[in-house]
Structure formats: C-alpha cells, structure tokens
Amino acid sequence: MQKEVFSDLLKQAQHKLDRKTKPVGSLGKLETLAAQLAAIQGSLEPNIDKKRMLIFAASHGIAAEGVSAYPPEVTGQMVLNFLNGGAAINVLSRHGKMNLHVIDVGVDVDLSDSAKEASNFFSRRVTNGTKSFLREPAMTAEECEAALKAGYEQVQLAHEQQVRLLGIGEMGIGNTTAAAALFSALLNIHPEEIVGPGTGLNEAGVRHKALVIQKALDLHREKSGADPVAWLQHVGGLEIAAMTGVILEAYRLQMPVVVDGFIATSAAMVALQIEPAAKQICFFGHRSNEKAHRLVLEKLDANPVLDLEMRLGEGTGAALAMHLLDAAAKIMCEMATFDTAGVSDS
Amino acid sequence: MQKEVFSDLLKQAQHKLDRKTKPVGSLGKLETLAAQLAAIQGSLEPNIDKKRMLIFAASHGIAAEGVSAYPPEVTGQMVLNFLNGGAAINVLSRHGKMNLHVIDVGVDVDLSDSAKEASNFFSRRVTNGTKSFLREPAMTAEECEAALKAGYEQVQLAHEQQVRLLGIGEMGIGNTTAAAALFSALLNIHPEEIVGPGTGLNEAGVRHKALVIQKALDLHREKSGADPVAWLQHVGGLEIAAMTGVILEAYRLQMPVVVDGFIATSAAMVALQIEPAAKQICFFGHRSNEKAHRLVLEKLDANPVLDLEMRLGEGTGAALAMHLLDAAAKIMCEMATFDTAGVSDS
C-alpha cells in the first residue's frame, strides 16, 4: 500500500481508539497492533477471527557439519508429531482456535502414506533438503524459486478461504545456522555476534558454528554480493525461502502475517530487503531467547509483541501473539466510546 | 502450602516438562507458569479452564485533592460501563472466555436499579468511598475489615463454583495515589520515586501528588508503624483492601490469582507482608507503564508475564496473561513426550 495511504489509515485508527473509554494510549502496544491491523485491512473494524498457522519443514545439509544439538532425523520425526497433534505448536494452535498447515518443502525422509493423507499436510517437496553450504550452494536458483512459490501458494489458498491472519513457523534441524548466516551476510553482523546455541549447543559447539558460518560467507560472497535472493539461495533453507514467499505474497494481497522467532525473522529480513514496504503487513510475534534475536529485531526496527524467553520455533511465539492481535482488533470494534457510555473525559 | 512440599511439586512438574518434545527449557516463561500452576493445584495435570475476573470498584476521598486527571464521578460511570459490557475489560474477558464479576465495595454514587439487578454485580458497599487520607484515616478499622471480607467472599464463591483461576482488577479514580502511598510506606520508597501520571497527570500534577503522599505519610506514620493492615486502613482504598482479601483467601484455598497492574500489585504487596507464603498462588500479569511498577515488582521479586506498555487497570493486563497461563497448563497436559512421539532426544 502507498506509504501515505497507510499512514493516513493508521491515524484514523488511532483517532477512533482515542474516543474509547480509557485514557489516551493506555492500552499501549494493543493500540499500536489494532491500528496496524486496521490499516492493513483498510477498515476501522478490523477482523481477524479466522487465523491460520503455517509450518514449513525442510532438512539442511549443513546439519551434517555438527552445528546442532539434535540429529537431522528429528526434522521428519517432528513433522509426524505435528500431524499427530502432539507438538507444542499443536497445543497452542488449538488453544488459539486456529488451524494449522504443515508444508513439507524438503524433508529428507520418507513420510508414511497415512501422514501424507492428513488434510492439513501439503507435500511440496522441492528436493530432499539443502546441500551443505559449507561446501556448495544450499540450493540451485530453481529450487529457491520453487520454495518461494510454496509460500505464495499458501497465502493464495488462505486468501481464497477468507483466512484473516497468518502465522509463520518452521521446523528444520540446522536452520539456526542458515538463519545466522543470512543475518550475518545481509545485515553485516560478524558470525560470532550472531551465533547462539540454537536448540542447545554447548560453548565449543557455538564457536564451531560461528567458524562454519564464517567459512561459508567467504565461499559464497563473490557470487551473492548484496543480493538478498542470491544469499537466500546460497546459505538459506527451503523453509526459510517459503516463509519469505509468504511475506511477499501476503504484502501483495494485503494480509497480516505474524512472524515467529529467530528463523522466521531471517525470512522476513530477506523479504523486506526485496520489498521494504512489506513491513506494513508484518507483526513480530516475540523476542526469542536465541542470543542475537534482540540485535536483529533492533536492526529491522521491529517491536516484538511478546518476550517470554522462548526459543522453540514451530511458530509457538507467533501463535501466542495472535491471541493478542485478536484482542487488539476486538478492542477497536467492541469498546464503547466516552459519548456512547456517558463517561466524563479528562 | 509448606515450602518444601511446594518446591518438590515444582520439581516434579519441571521433570514432566523436560520429557516433552522440545529442547529443555525452550518454552521459557510458559514452563515456569505451568510448573507453578501444577504446584498450586497439587496436580501434574493442571486445569484452569474455568476462569473469572473480579473487578472491585470504590471511590477515594483523596480524589478531591487534585491528584487525578479524571473527575471522581468517572468511577461510578465506569461501573455502569462494565455492567453494559462496553469497557476494555469486558472486551478482553469475552475474548479470554472468562466471566466477570463487578463488586461495588464503596462507589460514591447511586447506581440505577437495573444496574444493581445485573447477575454479575455484587453490591457490597462498605461506605460511600474512603475519606481523604491527607486529612484523616481513609477508613476505620471496621471498614477495612469489611472490605477485606468482600474479597474473601468472592474467592469462596469462585471455589464453590469450581472456578480454577481468578484475575483481580479495579476501578477507582484516585487509586494510583493510594497505591503509591502504600508502596512508599511499606517498601520505604520516597514518594517522588513512586509517583507517576496515573491516568494522565501532567508534570506539575505529578509533583503535587508526591507532596500529598509525603504529607499523608507524615500524618499517619505514628499510628501505622510497620503494620501493613494499619497502613491499608490509613492510606489504602476499599477496592485495594478487597483485593488483599482475595489473595489471602485464595492462598488459604490454594487457588491461583493473576494480579493486574500497579494498584492490584499494591494489594498483593499488603497481602504478602501479612502472609509471605501467599506468593505461591500469585501470578503478576504484566508490567504496567505506570512509572514505578518496574521498581515495585523488582522489590517484590515478581516476574511479570507480559509487558505491553499498558496502564489502564480494570484487570486488562491480568486478562491477557490468563490466556497465556491457560496455554501453559495445556502444554503440560497435552504435549507428547519424546518416547510417545518417537522423536530422538539430543
């Protein structure tokens, strides 16, 4: 949306909020969220009743380089856990009354037929996981494009089905390394500043991870330059590319998206380097406990909704924030004004 | 509950959480909340499905001393707004699927008969508001005791009706001054450090408010000494006393209570000075934007669930936190373990 149009809508929304029976600004972030939702939807009666969480899963070649506390096969095992309803994101999606789509964009395992038949499962496997970007590009340009398209497709489907709010989360053992490499390359942050323990590395593991990233950046710098899509292809992940696609397409269709933690933020960063105005439709669900998330959120000038010291991924932070966004929308639609309630203003 | 028993239950709960399909500790505060709920309920399957918000309302004599941005009659007008469903807390209670009780413990206005007939309204008016504590004690000892009892009664009622989680909020123009006086007296904080703009005072107003509190503390110090109940009677509020009563009775009946912002925290502080172990059942819903809330939470060693820069009161911060507590309970009950889901551990 044109910057001036968006900012005018924000002002109208804030004006409406200022007539509600409460001191001006006293609902804090809830008011900011409500105004942004109103501006995205182009309506002073924002409605995000129908919500959906998208989890993109993929395997990472870099996981073979000793950068994760968990073995690579956990990616596929967790996809089955999602389909069986037992993971944290299942619990939180049910609690938040949203449905959940699981999209396999490159999990390196044979899933059972019964899993594939689940109505909320989308088999969009581009390839059986990325290559190790310590040695070669993570994806070909065509693979990267196909993964982006898997993201576009989910947004188009949600749009057709009148879904009003999307959350994005991921599963992919090794993907904090890919995300850290992207941040390092595209925000000019030294690997040692950006690297954290992921799902649970010790100190030596963290140092090794930083070294892997430094070597990878040296290997791919010449071909990638300052091009966000080139970096996504060379050191990113299939699920990261798909989430980048979600944000770009959601911007085109003016749908709000709640970005989860460290990995999802790396996808958002790539999308915002491609299309800065897409920030209009982005909400950052939480500040995760992954060490450098605070730093990258600051660099993106992003104000996260929650800070619950979580570091799980899967969309868990986004899911909890989506309840608050829904609350914000309802504040705007349902609260009385000073006039209608007969309450004296200050 | 005995300290050792409580801490043993916390450990058992954390052990159960550590077997869930996620890296240990990766759900951050959600895990802490889940463990505390489990310990309070004495069950590793905590259940807080049925929730209730209690709003206590009362008028304040101190409001006549120019300490608030709003006129005193707003207290009664807002009670009607609560009963008509138009206030922020109504929207958030509906959104969080909890019912709402409005308890008049001393609102200085004639409420209409139709208001009094609302099934969620409790007329427990001790007196028509407190006296100005700049000049005399806010309450008599008998009035303070009656207000505490209005709090006990709501907890007993909730307990009988199988309500599993209570939130406490308030309405009372002038009550940030009463709360600040209590914090100043009982935590030894200088009035200038504790006083903030409340619902919207300007700088001169804030200075005046600090001066009013300083004079009141000088007036009541001899009679109150270090006795929390005496200070509650001399500079507190009827709704603050009622919320103190809620926490004391909820501790006796082992029911979890979510404390709202600055005012509700002052009630919690009084309760914890009377019975330190009552902290077991307290959750602090949010860090409010009222200036000194951060300081008093630190002094109480209380870790708030949310920080949304809100400063409205009414229980709004508690209501949003209650959704997260419910999420935490469900994580503990519904998530799969590494064994049942067939996921490899690290």
Image (cartoon, coloured by chain):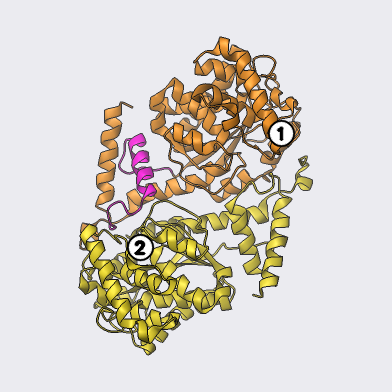
Chain colours: A yellow, B orange
A132 relative position to B131: left or right: left
Up-down: is A323 above or below B278?
A: below
Examine the rendering and report whether any part of residue A274 can be seen.
yes
Query: What residue is pinned by disc 2?
Result: A193
Looking at the figure, which quarter contains the C terminus of chain B? bottom left
- Above or below, comparing residue B311 to residue A85 in the picture: above
* Residue at 26% across, 50% down: B18
Where does the image place residue B199, in percent across and percent down from the top left?
67, 39
CA gap, disc 2 and disc 1:
46 Å
Q: Position of residue A189 (x, y in %)?
A: 39, 68
Q: Which residues are magenta?
A: B21-48
Q: Residue at x 61, y 44 (%)?
A: B89
In the rendered view, would you say A213 is above or below A305?
below
Say what amino acid the circle numbered 2 marks.
Answer: Glu
Q: Nearer the viewer, mark 2 or mark 1?
A: 2
**Quadrant of the rendered structure where residue A114 is?**
bottom left
Callout 2 touching callout 1 (CB < 8 Å):
no
